[in-house]
Every structure is written in structure tokens, then in C-alpha cells.
Image (cartoon, grey):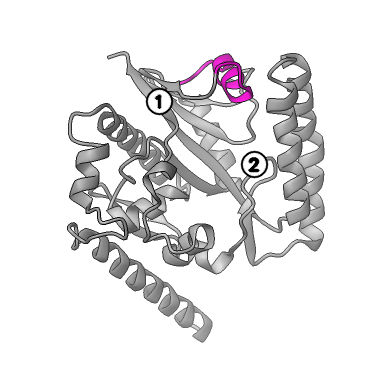
Amino acid sequence: MNLLAIIKRKLVFLHCLNLKEKVNEANNHSETVFNTGETAESLHREYNPDGSLLREAQLRLLDMLDYIDKVCREQGISYRLDSGNVIGALRHGGFIPWDDDVDVALSWSDYKRLCQYLSSHPHPRYKLQSPETDKDYLYTWNKLRDVKSQYVMNYPEGSKDMKVFERQKYKGLQIDLFPFEDHMLPRLQRLAGKLACVAAFDIGQDYPRLGRFLFNLNRRVFFPLFRLAGKFIGKADVVQHSYGTWFYKRYRKQDIVPYAKADFEGHSYPVPADADAFCRTIYGDYWQLPPKEKREWHAADIIYFD
């Protein structure tokens, strides 16, 4: 084994050791008093007690995540938890108590492989939501939906968000599947996000056919051109969400790969290589709980059909 390989393995080990210490801090101090005066137990009682609708949603999402994990392991696809679920793993050892969805991230190539598998191997309960399976779904990332449930959204009646949601075919519990890429061009990524929002919300809500036309023009013409330009002048050591998403944070590639593992609701799932640095890039001091009025979740209610 050459010196470079030895150093790389040593760095991976140190990343995993640091992450394990963070996870242990969350799991072994369940009665730690947070900055708000709350504890893990008091948060659980207030937001997601056993038997509550939200806890039922979280347990169903956990089943969906196990399905994604199983498929990825069997197909040799690499994925990881993303966004608030990484905070949940480190700070709570699972879901953020008021959270009601799951985000996973994959490289652009693994994202396409996973979506292709989910499309060609339909599950009796979970459906891939994409522009191909739902013509009014005008997002540039796909979702895995539970067809035995439905979000009841708290968007204002008649708002852009409500119109877009009501037109979609699948409305159940969701796992967002986010593609990530290197060689991204930040200015073009922001432009792509604006173009995607115009197609989906500004135009698509009232003129669905025109919205679909613009959406397909973006993903089949403009975004591939942006991606091609990035191959020549983009940075290989920085990654971002792919073109057409509206999440603009930039991450050091060394903080993302190779993936580590963290405990999440008693299961072990992949997370960024340096999950602590990843969370601080997005949220700053993520160990500080937000005030109650800023603790947001996606749905006002959830309906179950079984």
C-alpha cells in the first residue's frame, strides 16, 4: 500500500472517530439541557410522543428509508442522509422531534441509477414521483412517496405553493432524493434555481402546459449546457446540489466523501464524511435549538389510509 493510500485511510478513520464522538454525545446525554431549557425527553413529549400522528409518520418514513438503504446496498449505489436529518442524527440520534420528512443525497450518477431502479422495479406501497410518473410534478429532484398517506399542507389557500401541491398526483409521506455534483458553477446554479422556480411556481401554477414546456426546456437544454460548462471551469473539490434546485450552499468535497455512518433511530445510515463541518456550513451552531416559533414542519396534518 502506497503512502497516499495510507494517509487517506488514516483521514477516513479520524473523520469516523470524530463523528462517533458527536453521535455518542447525542445518544449518551438524553437529558442534556439545550439552550432553550428543554431536554430530549421534553421535546419528545411535546412534538412526537409515541402514538402521535407525527411519530407514526416518522416510523413510516423510517421504513421507507430502510427500503432505500436496502436497494442501494443491493445495487451498489452510494447515498447519504442530507440536511436536517444529519442534524437529527448528531443532535437527537434520530429525527428532529418536529420533522416530518427525510432527505437523502446522491452523486449525479448514483441519483440516475437509483431513480432508474425505482422506476423499473415498482413497490406496492412506495412510488417514485418524477416528471415521468406525475406530469404536474415540476421539480428537478425526484421523491419517493408513500401512497397510503397524504400530507395536509398548511399553505395559504390560493397560494402558489398550494396550487402546485394540489395539482400533483402523489401527496403522501416523502423522501426527497437530491442529486449532488462537483464542477458546479455557483452563478449558473442560482440562475438555474430561478429558472426552475419560474417554470414550477410563477407560470406552472396557472398555465400548466407552458410550465411543463419551460421545465423540460430547462432540464433538457439549459441545465445540461450549464453542466457541460462546469466540466471545463468548475471546481472539482467543491460540491453543491445539482442545477435546478434552489439550495445554494457549497461544501468542500472532503467534508462529504467518503461517507461515514451515524446512528439514526437505532439504525446505521451513511452521512457526510465530516458531518459536523457539513452541518455548520448550513446551520452554524446547529447544537442550539431554534426558538419554538421557527420550528417548522411541512404539513399541518397527515392522513393515513390504512
- Residue sitting at x 64%, y 35%: 140
Identify which residue, 36 or 154, lies in the foreground.
Answer: 36
- Number of numbered labels in the structure image: 2
Question: In terms of image quadrants, where is residue 201?
Answer: top right
Tell me where the magenta segment starts and ends, as one range: 157-172
Element assignment for label 1: strand
* Tag 2 secondary structure: loop
Mark number, residue 94 = none
- The percent position of residue 54, horizontal first and vertical second, equals 29, 31
Asked which quadrant contains residue 305, the reply is: top left
Residue 258 in sight in this render = no
**162 magenta-colored:** yes
Sequence order check, earlier mark of 2 and 1? 2
Apparent side of residue 228 relative to residue 118 in the rendered image (left or right): right
What amino acid type is highlighted by mark number 2? Thr
**Going 59% across and 25% down the picture, which residue do you hit?**
161
Asked if residue 245 is among those painted magenta in the image, a careful observer would answer no
Estimate how packed mark 1 is, as few (under 14), some (14 to 19) or many (20 or more) residues with alpha carbons within 10 Å. few
- The kind of residue on which mark 1 rests is Ala
- Residue, disc 2: 245
- Is the residue 291 above or below the residue 28 in the image? above
Q: Quadrant of the C terminus?
A: top left
Residue toward you, 49 or 24:
49
The residue to which callout 1 is attached is: 300
* Residue displayed at 73% across by 26% down: 202
